[in-house]
Image (cartoon, rainbow, N blue to C red):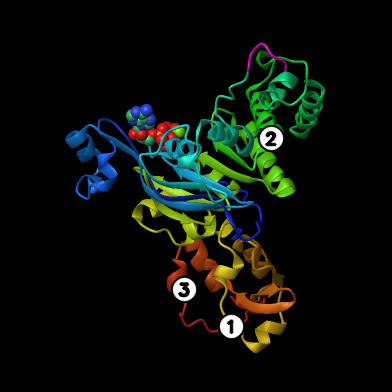
Amino acid sequence: MTLTVPTRKPPTTGTPVFSVDGLWKVFGPKADRIPADPELSTLSPADLRSRTGCTAAVRDVSFDVCKGEVFVVMGLSGSGKSTLVRCLTRLIEPTAGTIAIDGEDVRAMDKARLRELRRHRAAMVFQHFGLLPHRTVLDNVAYGLEIQGVGKSERRERAAEFVAKVGLEGMEKRRPGQLSGGQRQRVGLARALAVDPEVLLFDEPFSALDPLIRRDMQDEVTRLHREEGRTMVFITHDLAEALKLGDRIALMRDGRVVQLGTPEEIVSSPADDYVREFVRDVPREQVVTCRTAMRPASPQEATDGPAVRPDAPVAEAIEAVAHAGTPARVMDEGTCVGVVDHEQLLDVVAGVPAGSRVGRATPPAPRTSPEDV
Ligand SMILES: Nc1ncnc2c1ncn2[C@@H]1O[C@H](COP(=O)(O)OP(=O)(O)OP(=O)(O)O)[C@@H](O)[C@H]1O
Ligand SMILES: [Mg+2]
């Protein structure tokens, strides 16, 4: 597995855009009774189905999506990702729980308010683009603005701007049938962006694309996030994609969120065997940061040796330590906050859990000279 994990800012705290609490979605007969019933609500998916004929697609899920973050929902097929994200704007009606956007109760919204939510505040980008085949690229991008009632000249101007932004300049007059899959997905993305939503919701938008185009589109999302700081909820079943794009990842299994954390937390401290198995093949040195791997520095170590940033992946420290033959200093704004030597680096690569590294006696490694065997 190869990974390119961009250096990211620490996850935003601040006010949540979406705030979800105790959310359930149960499909099937008399679904309403399930969340409140302590006996039924704790049954395994198979038992629940055989006892009641119901499927609990989302089970008691709570999380906040912070302003400006990319929040990834990951899990295997059927784990409840699409159902969860569709509940956010009530494209699917939740069975129980609360959902708020900027503090406003989504479940209490009337039809008009919901329409406004979906058109202006939380735009969805689907896997199968949903483009209008007889319209040009420009008119497809302008479509969301047309629904909003924006006048013709303004919407064409805005649409042209977003067509250029996603790299489709010169293709304005083509129809979707004359585009590649990746280009069509860019049109879908431009259409969602043109309405300037507060949150973009992506349901596996790139899973139908071939690997190279997929990487281009991921880079596009990273760029948009960096340049515009837009809040995004991104569904994927692809771990590498989740690690690359997510500020935080919610890992789902059978409708539950089994772990919610930064990519580094999920890779370095899996919550259970299921998550551990999920992340088994991840190259940890590309995800775990020097801040997590470091140990306290001795006075001499603090003044000497190569420097690495606290948020740099451990892979960078491996290179520095191998090159210098001494521990690398983890420097935060000019201050040495710790060091990593070969022992911490080996622990990270070998997958020794972060917790068990703490408190371990770690004397400074003896220096070797070129003559030593
Ligand atoms: N309308 C429905 N009626 C009954 N069951 C449903 C319905 N929609 C989804 N489900 C069930 O809910 C569960 C979660 O489905 P969901 O589509 O949310 O999964 P997903 O994680 O998005 O999967 P995928 O990766 O395949 O898209 C599945 O068991 C599915 O069969
Ligand atoms: Mg899905």
Give the dominant element type of the magenta stretch: helix, strand or loop: loop
In this view of the protein, which residue sits in the foreground, 54 or 127? 54
Helix or strand or loop: what does disc 1 sit on?
loop
Where are the magenta residues, as a range?
132-136
Residue 352, percent across and down? 44, 66
Q: Amino acid at mark 2?
A: Leu
Q: What is the crowding at mark 2: few (fewer than 14 residues within 10 Å), some, or many (at least 20)?
A: many
Q: Quadrant of residue 195?
A: top right
Q: CA distance from mark 1 to mark 2?
A: 56 Å
Q: Which residue is mark 2?
A: 193
Q: Which residue is mark 1?
A: 366
- Image coordinates for residue 19, horizontal then vertical, percent: 50, 51
Provide the residue designation for mark 3.
357
Q: Quadrant of ligand 1?
A: top left
Residue type, mark 1 in image: Pro
Which of labels 2 and 3 is toward the front? Answer: 2
